[in-house]
Each structure stands twice: as structure tokens, then as C-alpha cells.
Image: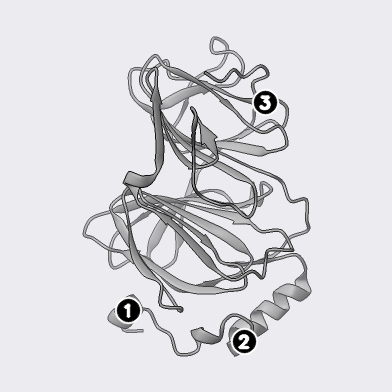
């Protein structure tokens, strides 16, 4: 069992707020809103909920990675390079947008589709790399169970198991489920910024389980930069589920316009020009429309 000698404390807490995104979709956004524009290297964290015909039709990206982790239902992903597939409950898609991707993400089944999408910034040296996908089905995600704790290792390592995902920006992404009465100690590299997002139940996080009060679902907890890991307890009567995400800060300037994230305003201006003129990575967008968009008739 890993031992955390200096647990990180909670520096700030945010309740994720619903907002409209895409075409009629609702997201609970925690990172990437007015109060928390950026938590280096993380740009956006959305817990999304979408039912057909709402969704996220054709839209571009440049300069970062987007990580889609499905919690319920399924979405169909299509891009302008012919990449297409369905991301089902428990599945992961790690997309490095790099120099440019235009894609759509739309409900694949009836009912409500739920998941998480995390945007991770890329360093200046990686912003214009060729796009890449890493996709793992639910039954191939590394898992471990010990003493009432289950972890799914999206990126990084926990309870002796490692993910196969390669991250351009050094990142850990762990999905923990704690049964009532259980606790976990998880090391975090000292150089990483890290946060928790609670999906279900209520938990106690930090240094003292007696002094701290339980924090419930849909709260984002930014961890302090001091310490070697996380200690968490489930002292309630229901399951506690949360993600722990950490990453190496880039320490670089940011210029952002919606789905374009670069280092300078000049690079943003160039990106807009590239997108509008179908150049420098966006060539295939000129004649492409997703099947979902064609069906919607616009």
C-alpha cells in the first residue's frame, strides 16, 4: 500500500454550474469558467448530459488534447479525416487535436448520455503536432481493487497498475470508487497541479478526517501545491466516486479563442485564417460534413 506522508489539502472548492454548449446540450463546467479560467495545464472540465437531437455537431480544435470518458450511454464521434466510432459507457477517447481537427460528437442511443470531457493544454513545441487518437474500451482500462477501493487508471498509475495511454503533457487521471468505511492514499508527483471532481456520494479529503466535513457530488476541489499525495475517506453509507487528475504545469502564456488554444494572439489570428481558408491542417474541412449534421439538415 502506498503511503502518503504529506497529504495535500483542499485549496479551493467550486460547485460545477450548468450551462448550454453545442446544440442544445447541457454541461456542468468547473474548469474553464469565469472563476477558474485555467488550472495549468487544464483548460476545461465538463460533466456533460445530452439527449438526441441535442449534441456537439461539427466544430474545430487546435492546440490541446481532449479526453472524453463516458459514464452512461454512448456518443458517436466523426472527424474530417474519416475517423469514426462509438464511445460507450466506461470507454475512453484521448484525442490529441494538435494542428487541427474538425469533428462531431452526437448521441448514439436513446435516453440521456453522460460523460466527462477534459481539455489538457499542449506545450508550444507540441501544439502543431499531427492529430492522434488513443481509444480504450471499458474492458481494457486498467483496474485494481483493494480494501473496498476500486480504481480505473485512465492515465498514470495507482494501486500497482498502469495505464497504456501516452500523454504529451505528463498527466494522471484516476477514477476511484470507495465503499462505505474505506479510504485511499494515492501519491501525486510533487510538481503536479491536481484536482478532484466528485461524481457520486460524499467524501472527506485532506489531512484530518475528523476536522473536515464531507463534500458532495459535482464539486471540484483544487488541491494545494504542497504535499506528496491525496488521502480520502468515505465515512458515509453510500458509494463515493470521484476522479483525481493531476498534470505537469506548462508555465507558458495562453491565448484562447473558444476551441483554439495557442500561446500568442498572433497564433490565434493565424489559426482563424487557417480555419477560414482550409489551410495548414484544416484542408479536409472544406468539403466535409458529419453524417449527423447531414441528418439534422443544416
Residue depicted at x 42% and y 15%? 235
Neighbor class of circle 1 (other Cα within 10 Å; few <14, some 14-19, many 20+) is some
Upstream in sequence: badge 3 or badge 1: 3
How far apart are the two marked residues, 3 and 2, measured between alpha carbons? 45 Å
On the image, the x and y values in percent for residue 110 come to 21, 59
Residue depicted at x 55% and y 86%? 283
In the displayed structure, would residue 48 be above or below residue 223? below
Q: Secondary structure at mark 3?
A: loop
Residue depicted at x 69% and y 44%? 248
Residue under label 2, please give it. Answer: 279
Residue under label 1, please give it. Answer: 291
Please tell me in which quadrant of the rendered image residue 14 appears.
Answer: top right
In the displayed structure, would residue 61 be above or below residue 89? below
Q: Which mark is residue 206?
A: none
Neighbor class of circle 2 (other Cα within 10 Å; few <14, some 14-19, many 20+) is some
Please tell me in which quadrant of the rendered image residue 168 appears.
Answer: bottom right
How far apart are the two marked residues, 3 and 1, measured between alpha carbons? 47 Å
Residue under label 3, please give it. Answer: 228
On the image, the x and y values in percent for residue 240 come to 39, 27
In the rendered structure, the answer to whether residue 57 lies left or right of residue 265 reads left
In the rendered structure, the answer to whether residue 203 lies left or right of residue 129 reads left
Upstream in sequence: badge 3 or badge 2: 3
Neighbor class of circle 3 (other Cα within 10 Å; few <14, some 14-19, many 20+) is some
Q: Residue furthest top?
A: 210
On the image, the x and y values in percent for residue 274 come to 64, 83
Front-most of residues 249 and 57:
249
Amino acid at each position: 500500500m502506498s503511503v502518503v506522508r504529506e497529504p495535500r489539502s483542499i485549496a479551493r472548492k467550486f460547485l460545477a454550474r450548468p450551462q448550454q454548449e453545442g446544440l442544445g446540450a447541457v454541461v456542468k463546467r468547473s474548469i474553464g469558467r469565469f472563476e477558474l479560467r485555467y488550472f495549468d495545464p487544464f483548460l476545461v472540465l465538463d460533466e456533460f448530459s445530452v439527449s438526441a437531437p441535442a449534441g456537439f455537431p461539427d466544430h474545430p480544435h487546435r492546440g490541446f488534447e481532449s479526453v472524453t470518458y463516458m459514464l452512461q450511454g454512448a456518443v458517436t464521434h466523426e472527424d474530417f479525416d474519416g475517423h469514426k466510432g462509438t464511445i460507450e459507457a466506461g470507454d475512453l477517447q484521448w484525442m490529441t487535436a494538435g494542428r487541427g481537427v474538425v469533428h462531431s460528437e452526437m448521441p448514439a442511443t436513446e435516453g440521456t448520455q453522460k460523460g466527462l470531457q477534459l481539455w489538457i493544454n499542449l506545450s508550444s513545441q507540441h501544439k502543431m503536432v499531427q492529430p492522434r487518437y488513443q481509444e480504450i474500451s471499458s474492458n481494457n482500462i486498467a483496474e485494481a481493487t483493494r480494501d473496498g477501493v476500486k480504481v480505473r487508471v485512465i492515465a498514470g498509475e495507482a494501486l500497482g497498475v498502469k495505464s497504456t495511454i501516452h500523454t504529451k503533457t505528463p498527466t494522471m487521471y484516476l477514477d476511484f470508487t470507495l465503499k462505505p468505511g474505506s479510504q485511499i492514499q494515492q501519491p501525486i508527483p510533487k510538481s503536479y497541479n491536481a484536482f478532484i471532481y466528485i461524481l457520486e456520494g460524499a467524501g472527506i479529503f485532506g489531512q484530518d478526517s475528523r476536522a473536515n466535513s464531507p463534500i458532495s457530488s459535482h464539486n471540484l476541489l483544487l488541491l494545494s501545491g504542497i504535499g506528496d499525495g491525496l488521502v480520502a475517506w468515505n465515512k458515509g453509507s453510500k458509494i463515493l466516486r470521484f476522479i483525481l487528475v493531476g498534470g505537469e504545469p506548462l508555465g507558458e502564456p495562453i491565448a484562447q479563442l473558444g476551441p483554439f488554444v495557442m500561446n500568442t494572439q498572433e497564433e490565434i489570428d493565424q489559426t482563424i485564417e487557417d480555419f477560414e481558408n482550409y489551410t495548414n491542417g484544416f484542408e479536409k474541412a472544406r468539403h466535409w460534413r458529419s453524417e449527423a449534421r447531414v441528418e439534422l439538415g443544416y
